[in-house]
Image (cartoon, rainbow, N blue to C red):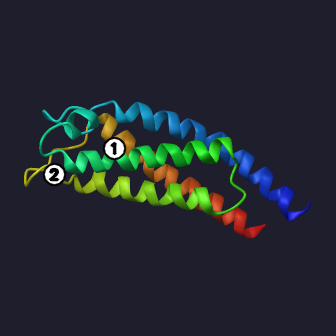
Amino acid sequence: MEPHVAKERIATGYARLYGPLAVVSVVIAFQPILEGAYGTLWETAARPAGGPAAVGLMMMFGLVVALAWATLRPATTAGPPVVIAVFAVLIAVMLITKPGTGSDRPGLTTFGNAGLALTVCGLGLTISHLVQLRRV
């Protein structure tokens, strides 16, 4: 099989997985991710001290756009998977460190844990995509 055809088959297979990740990412953005009175990411970003949440929203938007890009235009190059991996790492770091919550760090809700798991799975997916593209 020619390398270009093999890369297209690989990209088409991964595109089927990136789409559902994009949908679930949008759903999680509208759920409370931190325990306590923080509310959703949108509500937290609307508060006067909501700078970190606003950054989180921008990263979530970037992740969803990159996932949609990789879904609608299957990636035969490393561009979209690398962009997805970068956003996934940044979001995972924000979910783990919880910036802007003060010294008494709240725990993650079920949706927060799901978001963290989603970003880690997305990172693993993009790494495997990049490894397969490299091997062809």
Q: Is residue 131 above or below residue 9?
A: below
Which amino acid type is shown beneath numbered disc 1?
A: Leu
Residue at far bottom of view? 135
Query: With 127 as the anchor, is 133 left or right in this view?
Result: right
Q: Which mark is residue 37?
A: none
Q: For mark 2, does the 10 Å Cα neighbourhood hold few (<14), some (14 to 19), or many (20 or more) residues?
A: few
Question: With 77 as the anchor, is 7 left or right in this view?
Answer: right
Instruction: Name the amino acid, label 2.
Output: Gly
Q: Quadrant of the C terminus?
A: bottom right
The number of numbered badges drawn on the structure is: 2
Q: Evaluate if marks 1 and 2 touch, with contact meaning CB atoms under 8 Å apart.
A: no
Which residue is under mark 1? 57
**Residue 35 quadrant:** top left
Q: Quadrant of the N terminus?
A: bottom right
Residue drawn 25% across the image and 42% down it: 108
Q: Residue furthest right?
A: 1
Q: Residues within 10 Å of mark 1 (few under 14, many from 20)?
A: some
**Secondary structure state at the residue bearing disc 1:** helix
Q: In this view of the protein, which residue sits in the foreground, 45 or 100?
A: 45
Callout 2: SS: loop
Mark pair 1, 2: CA separation: 14 Å
What residue do we see at 37% from left, 58% from top?
90
N-terminal label among 1 and 2: 1
| Residue 46 horizontal side relative to residue 14, left or right | left
Residue sitting at x 23%, y 51%: 52
Mark 2 — residue? 100
Return the x and y of residue 10 as percentages of the image width and height. 75, 53
Image quarter for residue 30?
Answer: top left
